[in-house]
Image (tube, rainbow, N blue to C red):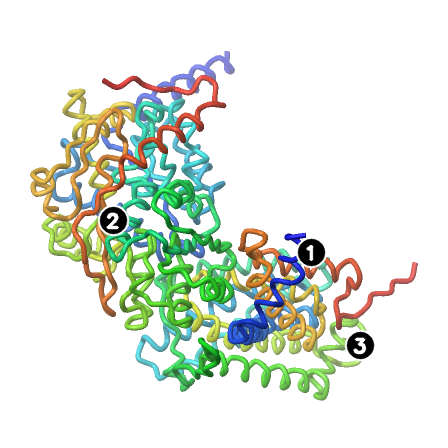
Amino acid sequence: MKKLLIGAVMALGTVFSSVSLSFADELLVPTMSYRVGPYAANGTMIANGFTDYFMMLNERDGGIGGVKVKAEECETGYKAQVGVECYESYRGKNALVHTPNSTGITLQILQKAPEDEVPILTMGYGLSAAAKGETFPWAFNYPASYWSQMTSILSYIDSQGGLKGKKIGFLYLDVGYGREPIPVLEELGPKMGFETLYVPVAGKEMQNQSSHWLTIRKEKPDWVIMWGWGAMNPTAIKEAAKTRFPLDRFIGNWWSGAHVDTEALGSKAKGYLASSFTTTGTDFPAIQDMIKYVVKPGKSKTEMGMPGKVLYNRAMFNAVIIAEAIAVAQKMTGKKNVTGADVRLGLENIKLDEARLKELGLEGFTAPVIGSCADHESGGSIFVQQWDGSDWKRITGLIPPMTDVVQPLLTAAAEKYVSDKSGWTTQKCN
Amino acid sequence: MEILYAILIAPFVEMGSYPDLFIQALWDGFVAGTLYGLIALGFVLIFKASGVFNFSQPILVVLAALSLVSFYKMGIPAWISVILVLILFYVLAWLVERLILRQLVNQDGNILFMSTIGLTFIIIGAAQWIFGGVPSAMIVNELGFPNGSLEWPMFDGGVYFEMIDISAAVIAVIMIVILAVFFSKTKIGRGLRAVADDHQAALSVGISLNQIWVIVWFVAGIVALVTGIFWGARSDVSFALQIIGFKALPVLIIGGFTSIQGAIIGGLIIGLGEKIFEIYWGPLLGSGVEGWFAYVIALVFLLYRPQGLFGDKLIERV
């Protein structure tokens, strides 16, 4: 009898706890952050920009659709295995979307998303092929994939004296993230008539690049494109200057052009280029509100001076996309407490056009992001910015990707990815 | 035939055709080698005194560099900041002796090794909490190290010698000489060797084990500070510096875990070997060979001379 009673109490407890989880009056948005470890400087900026935006929405608007957002961090130290543990810890908790903040973690959890019905948003990172919405219904990489970015960078180089007959150095962190755009270079090299010099930098050598730059000196490339992260970036810029490589012929991707990469170098990095899809500075009403409601009152971990920096603003925009997707999901379903599946629909139906960006206080901040069932990367346009010795300055308009090159590559990669995965969930788009 | 030419002939032709690049590679390898030697030295000192592989040595490099820059940012003059860092490391050495080593004396070496792993995470957490994670520039100019570079024009190019690299090499050599003399000619140095050989026998002849441990951890802290200054100058001061710390592993295998001169010779073998191999033979293997080349050299040494070039050969009676 006693055992029966205990069993009944436990069963009731389970029922009530699951009910409370399902109908909790908050929107759970986990994010995998890394405030410790070798990449902490970058991770801290990203975590702050992301969580501050939701905190601001809670303070200013009472959340989204009247429901508060719980933006919860799970520390990964930028390690894939720990990221998977973070992901597992949110199973059954009605997480609305996952932001792994690492291509390595993304590749590990990508297959779990359809099973758990929680979308993964990898803004500006992750698997390029995830742009194909029909093959990857649960993954999104708004506003551009790495492959699109690489074609835009090549377009920029082409506009600066042509690519034909040139040698392009590709300096990359030798991990999944760094190797991701290689297929584009292999495809475009013969087509556009340039030769590529591949210079991989192992993670444990990222602060020790003298031989990599001696190789570059020996091979004399006309341009160097960098796919770096963390301490690899400032080290590369220093070594480039040391080997007398012209910094205005050295261009980083959007993860190789942040304030944390150049501020400590100051005028030594003057002229260095990088791509970006988000604007720096605090001259946007949305960022002003974050300062007013969250940063100044000391409600977040952000120090004054951090808002406006490249990574802070970019992470804020990641939060904007999620917030918008939740709002769209609420509107589409008529529910306030939406689920991961609802947010997936929201992500496919967001319409962050110029008018909406203005409404959100982000006019001119980025290119429009228009969601769709088939296209999970949206427009894919970027611009180029240049370090002037003290700050990043935008020097070009929006550079669209070479869609005719990227789309067939994405389709082939998506097909290849699912070819050996039986029972993979796809969708049909009209 | 073509492959044999690419391996056996082409690299040497290239060295002769572009001597500026070859000399630059030798210089860069020499500087990297002395800096690897410095990192390895920190490990050697602690291993000599306690037979423990100090897993926390790389994070001590980070702690030294971060605290130096942070003190300076607080408005404290650069050289006063250096003194404050030295005081901090003396306190840390004392705490390590009191709270860890004294408690674990006579325990198995693996337990002591595990304790240094624990210490690493404590230091990471504390340093992150106190100093934050934002990268900073090393204050080399403020410390009075010369700026700029020397250029030696040669053929179409030239060889560039960064002043900070010259400073690093000179200071590393001076430091190694001082430490070698200190540990071989002074009473404390001889005491340290006695403790390393047999701490119970050392105790029985009146050598203070606790005092020796504090001194050796403090000296390892000084080495960490010098390493932090020069590696920080090559990149920036951030937690990523700890990664470079483990570059000392192959150096230790080559030089031996107990030899100060072994640390520097091992460092130079790795530094010069990996630069030359990466530049002239690396492209044949798809580049990026530097990451594993050091371990290949170390493996060869393990096969033929497991105690390293200068390490003590262990002879155990059965």
Tag 3 residue: B204
Q: Are marks 3 and 2 on the same chain?
A: no
Residue at 18% in and 54% down: A396
Label 3 residue SS? helix
**Residue B91 visible somewhere in the drawing:** no
Tag 1 residue: B110
- Chain under label 1? B
- Chain under label 3? B
- Chain under label 2? A
Viewer-proximal residue among A409 and A310 = A409
Label 2 residue SS? helix
Residue at 32% in and 72% down: A268
Distance (Cα) linking label 2 and label 1? 45 Å
Viewer-proximal residue among B64 and B209 = B64
Q: How many marks?
A: 3
At label 1, the amino acid type is: Asn
Question: Which badge, 3 or 1, comes first in the chain's sequence?
Answer: 1
